[in-house]
Each structure stands twice: as C-alpha cells, then as structure tokens.
Amino acid sequence: SRDTSNEEYRKRYELFVNDIIPKLSPQWMALNKKLLDSEFVADLKGTYYERYCTLVKNSFDLYTEKNIPLQVRVSKKADEFARIVASRNIFYDGKEQTIPQLSLYLKSEDRAVREEVWRLMTLQSIEEYDTLDKIFTELVSLRHQMAVNAGEENFRDFQFKSYDRFEYT
C-alpha cells in the first residue's frame, strides 16, 4: 500500500500469492503434522514449548487444502481493495495529498477547513463506493466459505482462532 503504482512490487506480490503460498502451505502443514505426531513432543516442557505446540496444533486444526485457492483469492481481493484506498489522492492546499495526509486537516481549529476536507474525502469515497462494496462483498463470501471449510460456523470464530485467541474467557 506504500507505492501502489510500482508494477515491479505488484508482480512480486502476485508471484508470492499465486505461486509460493499455495506450494508452501501444504509443506508447512506436513511439517507441523510431523511435529504433532512425534513421540518426543510430550518431552517438550516449559511454557515456551507448550505454547508453541498449542499454536501449531491450532493452525493444523484450522488448515484445509480447500482453503488454499480461497486464500489466494482473498489475498488478491484484499490487495485490490487496499490499492484503491491507498491510491486515493486529493488535490488540496495547492498539492496532491493522500488520505492520511489530508486527515491532518481534520484536526484543524478552523471549522471551514475541517468541513472542506471532510467533504472532499467523503465525495471521493462515494465515487468509489460501488467498486469497494463489490470487493468487500466478495471478501465476505470467500472468508465465510473458508470458515465453513475449516469446520467453523462463521468467519468471526474462524478468525478468532486463526489469531490464536483461544485462551480468553
């Protein structure tokens, strides 16, 4: 999202998402399975090793090969969404500025400045609403399917576990 116009960065990202992750994921899970199936895993004592084994088991439990193509699609859609948002530049105060740069004007003591900048930002958001909404809707559908494939009822529960948040009450 730092340089959305750099084609080389984009190609390298797409290579990683399209070619490396789909090949790496099954290998990584095979390695995790070897660890979990090892007769020596019970000998790993102490908070660090126990925590690590818990994390490995959790990622193994959530893993399904059916989600690999969905993860690729999610990565591409999320990147597309981020590129659109990151490339939003608005001409204000004599120069073209990004949304984060413009948001500083929202802290101005001058109400007219705050209002003008807010209107410019909102107008641009409205112009991109349909595109962003379509991408977001696709992401919701893909993420829900990933959750179902992993045996979860919904994406919230799936994501909660994928963030390794299973120790909270």
Image (tube, rainbow, N blue to C red):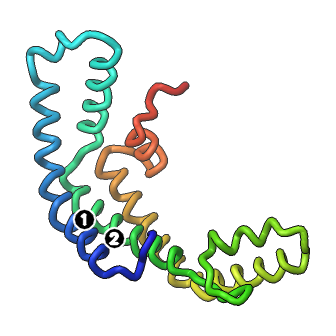
Please provide percent x and percent y for residue 158: 40, 45
Horizontal side, residue 69 vs residue 84: left or right? left
Horizontal side, residue 44 vs residue 147: left or right? left
Q: How far apart are marks 1 and 2 (CA)?
A: 8 Å
Please provide percent x and percent y for residue 62: 29, 42
Dots 1, 2 in contact, CB < 8 A: yes
Q: Nearer the viewer, residue 21 or 64?
A: 21
Say if 128 sits above or below 114 in the image: below
Residue in view at x 18 percent, y 50 percent: 25
Residue in view at x 52 percent, y 27 percent: 168
Point out the image quarter for the C terminus: top right
Quarter holding residue 17? bottom left
Please provide percent x and percent y for residue 153: 42, 46
Which residue type carries mark 2? Lys
Residue at the disc numbered 1: 17
Q: Is mark 2 on a helix, strand or loop?
A: helix
Say if 41 sits above or below 128 in the image: above
Say if 27 sits above or below 129 in the image: above
Residue at the disc numbered 2: 76
Quarter holding residue 94? bottom right
